[in-house]
Image: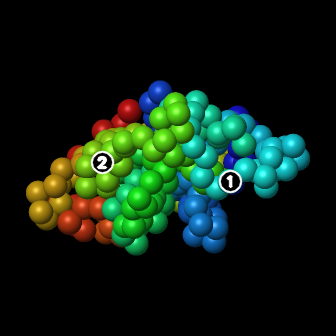
Amino acid sequence: MPRDSAALYGAGKIIGNKSAAFSETRIQQKRQQKYSGVFGKVKWTFFRKGKSTSATKNTMDKRPRIIDVTRKPRKCPVCGGEIVDIIYGTGDMTEPEFLLEYRREGILGGDNIPRRPPIWACGCGCKRFRKVNPDGTPATVKVKLLKNVRKKPLTLIEFSTASVHEVVLDGKLDRIHHYKVSFTTEYGEKETLRIGAACEQDARDEAIVLVMEGRFGLKGVECREMGVEEI
């Protein structure tokens, strides 16, 4: 998928069965809109399947905000986007904060759970889906609560430093190295980050800043013990 080289600064990607990239620019967009899928390397641009056409836009105008379904849709019938869970009990947490702290996709439903709550939503937020029985009567459902969501490993995200941006602009991609940085906070919390950097010290410094900024929902803000390994 084509990407602007300048967009690589602070950008990140999720490593695993699903591939996505995120950007800080995207986070700002999410804050300006109500939702934007973000995460990762600290520049997170969510690449999703499906295109919005004039036909689907017209359909979107005619369909209700919440659509009744008998089972989880494979994709959004309006925009073709991916279907994700709605997470309740999230308080004032934003989608960028949720994605960075839990490394999962989802739409936040807040603390107010409706009597007939929708439990799925399109990843872009255009539609929500409420489960019903085949005869159209309300189905018994169990909503997903934030307190029950398990965090995925931080190594699913690869962060990159400002030095990487400079290297990309100079066209010297062979100077980009990838590291695993392990650390222990002052509260004994142990985590590992994947960081793209120009050198080992660059990766170490980036990890210290990310932890100090409290990006990962850890209690600690200091890296007491650190280990760096090139991968």
Quadrant of the image for the N terminus? top right
Q: Position of residue 142 (x, y in %)?
A: 33, 45
Name the residue at the right extreme.
54
Residue with the mark numbered 1: 64
Please identify the residue farthest to the left as the structure is shown. 188
Mark 2 is surrounded, within 10 Å at the Cα level, by few (under 14), some (14 to 19) or many (20 or more) other residues, namely few
Instruction: Name the residue furthest top.
Output: 17
Which residue is rendered at x = 32% and y = 55% of the image?
A: 146
Tally the marks: 2
Q: Is residue 73 visible?
A: yes
Could you give the CA–CA distance between mark 1 and mark 2, rounded to whole angstroms? 29 Å
Please provide percent x and percent y for residue 138. Answer: 45, 44
At x 65%, y 39%, the residue is 76
Q: Is residue 92 above or below residue 155?
A: below
Q: Name the kind of residue labelled 2 in the image.
A: Val
Q: Is residue 124 visible?
A: no
With 78 as the anchor, is 174 left or right in this view? left
Q: Which residue is mark 2?
A: 149
**175 and 214: which one is in front?**
214
